[in-house]
Amino acid sequence: MPSFSISPDLSKWLEHHAGDDPIKVRLAGKEVEGYTAAFVADQLTARQRFKRKFPKICADPFFVFPPSVHLEQASSETTARIKLELILDHPSPRNHIIDLTAGFGVDALSFSEIFRQVSLVEPDPYLHDLTQANFIRTAPTKFSLHLQTAEDFLLNKNLHADWIFVDPSRRDEGQRKFLLEDSFPNVVALHRRLLEVAPQLLIKTSPMLDISACLKSLPGITGVHIVSVDNECKEVLYHIDSTKKMDEPEIRCINIRNNGTRELFNFFPAEELNRIEVAVLPDQYLMEPNASVMKSGGFNSLCRKFGLMPVGNSTRLFTSTTAPFNFPGKIFKVNRPFTKSDEGMAAAVISRNHPLSADQIRKKYSLKESDKTFLIAFTGRSEKYLLLADRL
């Protein structure tokens, strides 16, 4: 039988054995304070591996974690906070939100900070029962949990909310092409019903999905939020505000750095229609956009806003005579071309649209590791470059 609570004795044991190897605990197969070895190993693993992802939850000694597979797929507390801020920035009521894909409730916990009522829908009996046990202990009057599929839950004709949040999962991991229509629940098929229930709809998708395909599949999207953490694209959020009519959605790129500061860049798709001319030669500075901007494809808008020029048609590096202020990405000061006499030096390698990968370049020139000097390899307008640079 699965456990949905942690006793004071087990809580103390987990605190005293916080550094123990979960694999050894699992393989030993011995009960700990009346709990199975597998359950205790899962709790240790969660608190060790996912402390950065769920710092607040991990600080709760009585929170029960599911196995790691569910933790890997869940939103982090950082990205859950982005959703919260997105809703806070909108002037709509915040009485009731429905989370149609609750999982073990990371996003729902965040929503509970600003909504009076949070309805959680979860078809998996184990996750439903675990989440219910956690939430009854923390805020029993705030949450209502429903052991149903999203489709069955939406059959309730009297259902109404201010917001709906949904994080569809991929139906078939073997598919090479990933479409929103292939997800569960199918938000494309449910689109009309979702907006009958709530005027505000927030859909989270994997960065694997093509943004232009999602915009075609879901009419009425008013905002696209591309969220990265430490320059790794984590999720894309699509906001549909049925009270607002827009010709096209605003694309918002957010990268949250390690120190908590943010890189922001917004644009509208129409701004991408006028292309920026490619630079004849790279100038004194090279710029590499962050992962959110890369995912957005808003490079012409980026160039106009920061006074940049592309170094090549498909290189995704940009150049200028001065270092742009508040650029959403990395800025490099070009020193000089890489020469044969530089073989064996210490340099970090960046390869963009170059015949050789970073590893191939490192091996070819016997380069040592470095975090100070950079060798940037790329294809320019008419030739290929190897340039030594310092990161600002």
Image: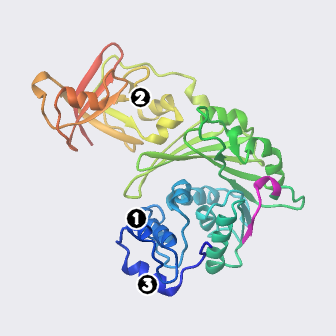
Drawn side of residue 340 relative to residue 4, left or right: left
Q: Residues within 10 Å of mark 1 (few under 14, many from 20)?
A: some
Q: Amino acid at mark 2?
A: Arg
Residue 337 seen by the camera: no
Q: Amino acid at mark 1?
A: Ile
- Disc 3 versus disc 2: distance between alpha carbons? 52 Å
Q: Residues within 10 Å of mark 3 (few under 14, many from 20)?
A: some
Q: Are marks 3 and 2 in contact (CB under 8 Å)?
A: no
Q: Quadrant of residue 91?
A: bottom right
Q: Start and end of the magenta stretch?
A: 144-152
Q: Amino acid at mark 3?
A: Lys
Drawn side of residue 141 relative to residue 71, left or right: right
Label drawn at residue 316: 2
Residue placed most toward the observer, 317 or 187: 187
- Disc 1 versus disc 2: distance between alpha carbons? 43 Å
Secondary structure at badge 2 equals loop
Q: Determine which residue is flagged by label 1.
A: 23
Q: Determine which residue is flagged by label 3.
A: 12
Identify the residue shown where x is 81% and y is 58%: 153
